[in-house]
Structures are given as C-alpha cells and as structure tokens.
Amino acid sequence: MDVTIKILRYNPEVSEDATWESYQVTAEPTDRVLDALHKVKWDLDGSLTFRRSCAHGVCGSDAMRINGKNRLACKTLIKDVNPSKPITVEPIKGLPVLKDLVVDMEPFFDAYRSVMPFLVTTGNEPTRERLQSQADRDRFDDTTKCILCAACTTSCPVYWTDGQYFGPQAIVGAHRFIFDSRDEGTDQRLEILNDKEGVWRCRTTFNCTEACPRGIEVTKAIQEVKRALIFRR
Amino acid sequence: MTGPDTGPSSRHPMTGNRMDPGDETEPSYGTGFETHAYDVVVIGAGGAGLRAAIAAHDAGARVAVVCKSLLGKAHTVMAEGGIAAAMGNVYAEDGWQVHFRDTMRGGKMLNNWRMAQLHAQEAPERVMELEEWGALFDRTPDGLISQRDFGGHRFARLAHVGDRTGLEMIRTLQQRTVALGIDVFMECTVTEIFTDRSGPAPTVTGAFGYWRETGRFVVFEAPSVVLATGGIGKSYQVTSNSWEYTGDGHALALRAGASLINMEFVQFHPTGMVWPPSVRGILVTESVRGDGGVLRNSEGERFMFDYIPEYFKAETADTVEEAEGWYADKKNNRRPPELLPRDEVARAINSEIKAGRGSPHGGVFLDIASRRDADFIRRRLPSMYHQFKELADVDITAEPMEVGPTCHYVMGGVEVDADTERSKVVGLYAAGEVAGGMHGSNRLGGNSLSDLLVFGRRAGHNAAYHAYGAAQDRPRIRDEEVRAAADAALAPFRLEEDGGAENPYTVQKDLQDVMQRLVGIIRKADELTESLAEIGRLKERARHLLVEGHRQYNPGWHLALDLANMLLVSECVATAALAREESRGGHTRDDFPGPDPEWGARNLVLTLEGDAVRLEQQPLPVMPDQLKTLFEDA
C-alpha cells in the first residue's frame, strides 16, 4: 500500500524553523513506522536523522510522537496508525531538538542520575549472593522493565512546562530501588523526591502510563512513592 | 554522588556534551580538534566495555568510555536467555570443570582452552558481583539466584531474569558506572587507533573519533585502549544484530597491526522470526526450547530426532518418551535434541526448509502453545509473548511461531593473550564479541554474557596496569597522524566534489546480499571465490560514495565510514571461510561436509599488510594433560 509519512524536519544549519515534509512510501500494513522511516532515509532523503538500535523495542532509542502519541517507531505497525491518512512523526516533546527526530537527552539523563539509581548498601560485602525471596523480587519487577526511552517523561504535561520536575522516568528509576528489599538508601532517595520539584508535582494525568511501551504502570509507581513518603517515619 | 573527577575533560561525563565550551584546547595538531588525556579508553559501552571500565576505574586508572549510541542501548541489552555460570544453585553437582567441558565441546574443541577455563572458573564470581551491585534475578525457592536450562549446557546454569537478562545486566553496569562517576562519551565514534611503530611491536598512543552530533573531531591520548565493540552482523541481510554491529573493533584492530582469528566462524542462531518481512531476523530466545518448546516441520513432525550427530549421541535423547521425561526428571533422562548446540539446530532447520518441509513463510514451526499452559508461557517468556503479539500478531500461547536461522554472533575476533586480553599491539586490549578464541567454532547460548563479564574485567584491569607502566616516557601521537585520520574521515565529503555517485545505503544493501547469498550458513568454494570478487567490486564502489549535507548529525556520512569496516571484515570472513576446507561449528562447507582432525588443530590468523588481507595458519594452543582427562571421563 502507499503511505504518506509527514515528518517534522529540523536542521539548524539550514533554518531556525522546523517544517513539515511529506514523503510517499510503499509499505506493508504489517511494516512498522521505523521501516517507513528507513525507506525515506535509504531511498528518498539520506539526511533524515533519527535514533534506533535494536529495532524491536528493547533498547529504547526510537521514541517519537507518532500521530500525536509517544511511541517506539519499531513497535508501531503501520496498520495501527490509520495509514489512509498521512501519518505524522515528530520528535518527543519537552527536550531540545538537535536535528529532525533527534533530541538532546541530557536533561532526561540528568534527572535519571539525580535519584541515585544504584543499589545503596552498608556493611561488609557479601561472599555469595544475598538471599531474596521470589515475592520480594516481584515487588519491584514492573519498574525494572524500564528501557530509558523517555516516552513517559516527554508525555508529561508538567514536564513540558517545568524543566526542573524530575519527570516520571526518574521516579520509576527510584521506585526500582525504594522497593528493593536489598537496598538501604531509601531515606536518601525519598528525601530527594520529597523536593518541591519531586513526586508532588505529579498530577496523575496517566499520560506516562499510556505512553510506556513496556507496559509499566508508571502512575501507580509514582503513587506508591508518594505513599511511602506519607507513611515513612 | 555523581560528580566525578572530570580531569582535563570539559565534557559532561554521561553525554559528552560540552559544559564549558571556552575550555576546549587547541593542541599542536592544528584547529578543529578537541583532545582528552586518559589512562584507559574503552571503545564500546556494552557488557564488556562497561565491565572493563569499572575494572580499570577500580584499579585507579582515569577511564573514558566512548560509544556510538546513547549509554544503555548497546547490543547486550537484547540478550534474553541468561548468564552461564556454574554456581550450582539448582544442580549442586555443577562445577567449572563441567562448564569448561561443555564450552569446549560446543566449540568443537577449537576454543582457546585457557580462555574457556578462566571463563568457567570466574563466571560465578562475576554473576554474584552483579547481584551485589543490585541486579535483579529470578530466585529459587530458597532465595538463591535461579538458573535455567539452555542448549549445550549439561546442567541448568543460566542466571536470568525472565527473558530480559541483558537489559538488567546492562542497566546494572550502567548504574555502577554512574555511581563511580566514570566519564562516558556518548554518540561518539572512533575511526582510528593511533600507534607508535618505532619499537619492535606497534604501541598504542591514542585514538581518533568524531561526535555524531556535531561532526567535530576528538583526539584521545591514552597508552591503553580496550576494544569492546561487539560483532559484525550488519554485513548480513537476515540478522538479529542492531545497527552498531559493523565490525568497527575488528577493523580498528587490523589497521592498528593486531591479528584476527577464527573469522570463518559465524553463528546463525536457529530461531529468528521469519514473518512479517520487516521483522525477519529478530531473535526468538533459546529459552523457548529450554522451557519446553519443540521444532516441527510442515508435516507436523518433530524433526530434530533425525539430526542428532554422532558427537552428541551419548547425551541426547533419541526417543520422544525420553525427551519428554527430561523436563520433569533431568537426572535420569537425556536432553531433547531441540537443545543441541546452535550450529546443529540451525543446520537441521536449514535442511528441512531446503527439503520443502518448511512453514508458509520459509521457516519451521516452533511450538510451545500446545505444550505449556498460557500462564506459564506468559510468566517465563513475557518478552517473547509481547514481541510476537505486537510485531507479528501471533499469540504464542495459542499458535506456533514461524522461525528460521538468523545471523547472530561472530566467534572470530581479535587474537588476544588468554590471561591479559592483550592483542599483538602493545596497549591494545579486546574483550567480548570483538575478541576471538573463547568460543572456538561455535558459542553456547548464555556463554556470551558471562564472557563479557569475565574478560571485560580482565581487559580493563590489565589495561590499567599497562597504563601505569607506560607512565611518563611513552610515545605520543604525532601531528601528521591526526591530520591523516581527519583527512580519511572527511574523504566521503571530498569525493562528492569528484563526482561520486554511490549511495552508501545501496552499497551496504549489496554487501548484505553478497554475504547472505555466498558466505551464509552453507558454503562452497566457488561461491566463496565469487564473494571475494564481489567484495572487491564493492570496495571500489565504496570509493565513490555520495554523502549529502554537512558534518552535523549526518547518518549518511556515519554509514560511509562504517561501511569501510564492514567491507574489510567481510573480506576476512570470506577469506578464512575459503581456506578452511572442512565443516566445523559455525562453518559448514558443502564441498567438505565433515570435520578434519588436521584442521581441528589449526587456527586461521588474519592480518593487514597495506590494503591487503593476509592469511596464515597457526597451531592451536595445546591443552594440558590434566584438563584433557575431563574429556576422557565423559
């Protein structure tokens, strides 16, 4: 079938303004939006720029706004985004655009790093693995599925307007350790998230949960962190 | 907590973005370069690269990690099955000797025995260290790290978390990197290793690269460089590998004066997706078979029983009854033939398809739906469930998958010293997929993640110690080398002015077609000869690439530079494949169908002389008698 892909192009070397460009490609309904973008790049315009690595939803490189919704281009089938009309593709919102669909990820990684995303323990190093029951391990299973694609953070209306807000991903990243039975850094982490730009900025709009390509219940995780803050002593 | 000692670097440690643009130095090479001095530069940020960086940091070295993608996106992230380590958590009778023996037999005894030994001995410690750093693992009822069954492994030995072990491993190493404050240069590609050639052996002086974002050049001054760049799969049409896999480290090593071994051995994973076409090649984890999945042809026949080789007869079930009994009672039954090493299963699938017993889209059926209940499948194989649901509209709890071989891994790589991971170039180390020797002619599933950890750590550690020894009077990068490297990197733009007309994407596609057709899973002398002629023609075409635009984030230019590596590495694969006149592991010759004991005692070594690839035979390192007895008992 013939499909029209409408891409928001931006090249600061050419112009200050981003412009919509349309491309016609032939695609199977079961092709992914990523395949259509590759066709544009390989056959029509070699300068089209976007990130991708694994191409099946594990590495989290190709989050973009497709028909106005944050998705991974490698997991979005053409037939699911109404190909009878032009399919719009633009960069994720809230991060500076560098070129075409590539955004500066630094503010996102900055938030990721700020919640101490590593296990904090005290005492002697164990000689074997620490014991952890399957139930304790399941407690934070959901938030370990994160692939750092930024789809959640850049779908959050609070993040769009308030660059100091950590954003959903950082809270997901903190949740992964706060609810890990082996971690001893919970107090420090909760203190960071208790900041006025911390979890309390979340307005539970559920955009993040809807945007997560891994099906993580992001809003629920944020609520659990809020509850942990309220009930801690 | 995250504020590292940035040393002379004014780049942000995680992104490499300039924090103080005014601080950039303009060294003697002239303008247009930024320079950074480190003790150890690690190229690649997958499992091996990050583990090497952590080890070098722990040894006190100033370390930079340089990677083509964003941190955390490297190919390791895609590993599904687990980390092979004889921890004995599920089977107490497991031990390094058994793991060593399985690895050597899986590689058809062509492995570097010392690497296989170190790997088997140190893997458990590396897994426990990951746990100590916070990695999530599935657990046994006693709360120990759980271990799962995989092809070629005598005991259940793969430490895992669901079917996303690679993701958890890279995230844990990434977290550790953040906690230690190691400098990471993201989206920065290295195009050259600088060496001093005045001594008896070439000696590393640094590396040259460019920022993908700005196209600006970067010079790293460092006495030690660790290559951890992964594999070469993007030279094939049907592959499970991601775009980064263009053989960069293999090519960098050759050009720096190092040697490659075992390049004829390319692993085709037996189960890649075959439908729809856009996702052809994407991996279907071996865990599907470990957890009860079986392979069937179009006649519904469980065909693997027809393909049990003599070599593995003693340990493989030859009746359906025994194979079925194994899942419940592993001590008293032999393993199902679906769990033979990957090369055996891939060849069997290939034969079934060729004989006309394939599935509608040119694969065979992998069936777990009729054998395990839906809850079990969704719990044990969540990623596979979603992958098929979302990409192929197939519910693997209700219908069989269609699968076929896909280019997955290169056993060959940089020839290194087994204990130190040092190549023939002083100061140049290699670890992970880019290194050769460990896996012989065929890698067992699960042995890759453990390889990354064991040899990543060793490489990083030894690179750091080399840097101390090299401290003050070491040779420096010469100005003309930097100018030459910049010149080479800019060549694709200059050729545009010469009237170049080749689209780099077209040349890449043509190379993939040649490698798939002529240097694929089954090989013949005349086809390999033809492939070398084709590669020669493609090299010529690659001299006339047309790259549009400028240096700022220009994917066409990036590919033009990667393409040179792909062509060189493809030539090495084809050259070695033509020379090895036998079939063994990941190298199957239609014209020499059996293994040959004489070839079994020899490695093929490739080097670069000028622009020409040179091939030599070299005897295999001899295993000590003490280890040989492990094979007699079997």
Image (cartoon, coloured by chain):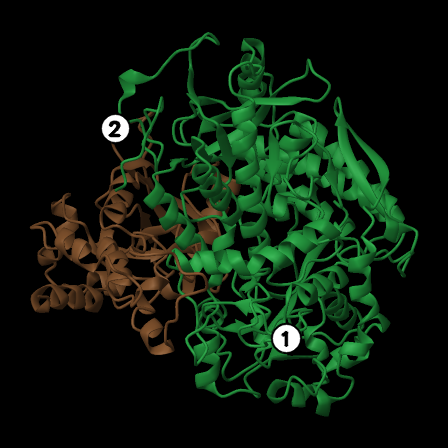
Q: Quadrant of the C terminus of chain B?
A: bottom right
Residue B172 lies left or right of residue B340; in this view the side is left
Q: Position of residue B505 (x, y in %)?
A: 57, 39
Q: Position of residue A186 (x, y in %)?
A: 20, 59
Where B74 sits versus B124, above or below? above
Q: Quadrant of the N terminus of chain B?
A: top left
The residue tagged 1 is B93
Pinpoint the chain carrying mark 2. A
**Residue, x 63% and y 54% (percent of image)?**
B119
Viewer-proximal residue among B123 and B266? B123
Where B301 sits versus A139, above or below? below
- Say which element carries label 2: loop
Tell me where residue B271 sits by quadrant: bottom right
Tell which chain the image draws in brown: A
Tell me where residue B280 sits by quadrant: bottom right
**Residue, x 44% and y 57% (percent of image)?**
B130
The residue tagged 2 is A16
Number of numbered markers: 2
> Residue reaching furthest front?
A124
**Residue, x 27% and y 48% (percent of image)?**
A112
Three-letter code, disc 1: Glu
Q: Position of residue A132 (x, y in %)?
A: 37, 72
Pinpoint the chain carrying mark 1. B
Q: Position of residue B425 (x, y in %)?
A: 67, 28
Q: How busy is the neighbourhood of tag 2: few (under 14 within 10 Å), some, or many (20 plus)?
A: few
Is residue A55 among what the camera can see? no
Viewer-proximal residue among B177 and A111? B177
Residue B210 lies left or right of residue B485; in this view the side is left
